[in-house]
Image: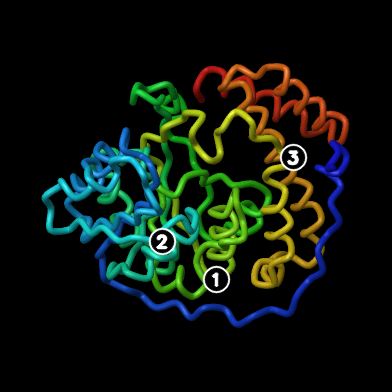
């Protein structure tokens, strides 16, 4: 059983030999494939598809049904749009479904949209505009707001208007904590995504964070300071379910800091400190989610865990948890 001490005291992984860096080429293609893994999301998939197909810049929308037993497939089939494709990948998991969809995608750029979220108007246009101004970027990303299960806005992230997240070489910052959070705000260069092998299907949680770190190891990122997505928070979410604890996310930390591609691009003496920061980041995230779902006792326990292991990190973590209570 993993203890509180184990959460923040995992051993550092050995370094690996540096692999060759992916050669970057300026690609003027702007075709975009939206990949939507879907399993038993009949309550949301229609709204998600409307938001994706409303993006005029989208070349195709690929729904990967992962063994639905509700009306998900029927709802998708009822949508009349030549850009929409439905393929099947029975019960292989979300990472395998995304990878399967990416293999069938024809676009130069990929956007991985969860089947219960919705793109905001102009989201893809904003991402493509930034991509044109950053020809060396392998990933373009923006920001999001949050909605509840009924689609009502609960986030107040517009209060952070003008907030800047990192662009360029972001690997060290990203290894210390996932500041992207949701794939629906991300355009990924398709050739880069395939070069790093896609999502790791062995990870149950935070597989996107690991994937973004691998992409940051081979190229630059570009940030778009706009709210591009309505991210639905409800207890059915993989990351947001009320029973999730920091221990659920630790395998992703171990995977990131045992990945030769990532370690080879980090500063020689930085991995240990970044790993500790990543662990604190995930404990803080768990406290934030606990507050959002009314589990205040758990939130205080997670903050105490941070305070006992890294007192300097506690004030910042406490501020983030307090802001989460107000939807920020």
Q: Which mark is residue 188?
A: 2
Above or below, comparing residue 166 to residue 82 in the picture? above
Residue sitting at 56 percent across and 61 percent down?
201
Residue 57, x across and y down, in percent = 20, 55
Query: In the rendered structure, which disc, 3 or 1, sits on the residue that comes first in sequence?
Result: 1
Residue sitting at 82 percent across and 33 percent down?
312
In what element is the residue under mark 2?
A: strand
Q: Which mark is residue 280?
A: 3
In front here: 228 or 48? 48
Q: Which mark is residue 218?
A: 1
Q: Which mark is residue 315?
A: none
Assess disc 2: are there few (<14), some (14-19) or many (≥20) residues with their C-alpha within 10 Å of its C-alpha.
many
In what element is the residue under mark 1?
A: loop
Assess disc 1: are there few (<14), some (14-19) or many (≥20) residues with their C-alpha within 10 Å of its C-alpha.
many
Nearer mark to the viewer, of 1 and 2: 2
Above or below, comparing residue 74 to residue 130 in the picture? above
In front here: 218 or 208? 208
In what element is the residue under mark 3?
A: helix
């Amino acid at each position: 059983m993993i203890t509180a001490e184990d959460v923040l005291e995992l051993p550092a992984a050995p370094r690996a030999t540096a692999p060759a860096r992916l050669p970057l080429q300026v690609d003027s293609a702007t075709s975009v494939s939206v990949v939507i893994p879907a399993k038993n999301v009949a309550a949301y998939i229609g709204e998600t598809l409307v938001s994706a197909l409303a993006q005029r810049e989208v070349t195709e929308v690929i729904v990967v049904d992962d063994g639905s037993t509700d009306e998900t497939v029927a709802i998708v089939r009822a949508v009349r749009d030549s850009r929409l494709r439905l393929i099947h990948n029975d019960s292989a998991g979300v990472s395998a479904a995304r990878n399967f969809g990416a293999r069938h995608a024809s676009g130069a750029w990929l956007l991985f949209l969860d089947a219960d979220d919705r793109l905001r108007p102009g989201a893809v246009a904003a991402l493509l505009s930034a991509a044109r101004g950053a020809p060396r970027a392998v990933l373009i990303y923006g920001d999001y707001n949050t909605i509840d299960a009924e689609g009502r806005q609960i986030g107040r992230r517009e209060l952070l208007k003008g907030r800047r997240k990192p662009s360029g070489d972001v690997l060290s910052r990203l290894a210390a904590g996932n500041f992207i959070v949701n794939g629906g705000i991300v355009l990924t260069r398709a050739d880069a995504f395939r070069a790093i092998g896609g999502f790791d299907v062995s990870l149950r949680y935070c597989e996107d964070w690991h994937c973004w770190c691998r992409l940051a190891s081979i190229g630059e990122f570009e940030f778009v300071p706009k709210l591009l997505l309505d991210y639905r928070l409800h207890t059915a979410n993989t990351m947001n379910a009320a029973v999730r604890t920091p221990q659920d996310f630790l395998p992703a930390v171990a995977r990131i800091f045992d990945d030769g591609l990532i370690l080879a691009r980090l500063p020689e003496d930085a991995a240990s400190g970044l790993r500790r920061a990543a662990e604190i980041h995930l404990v803080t995230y768990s406290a934030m989610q606990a507050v959002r779902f009314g589990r205040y006792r758990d939130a205080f326990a997670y903050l105490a865990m941070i305070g006992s292991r890294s007192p300097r990190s506690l004030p910042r973590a406490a501020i983030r948890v307090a802001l989460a209570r107000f939807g920020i």
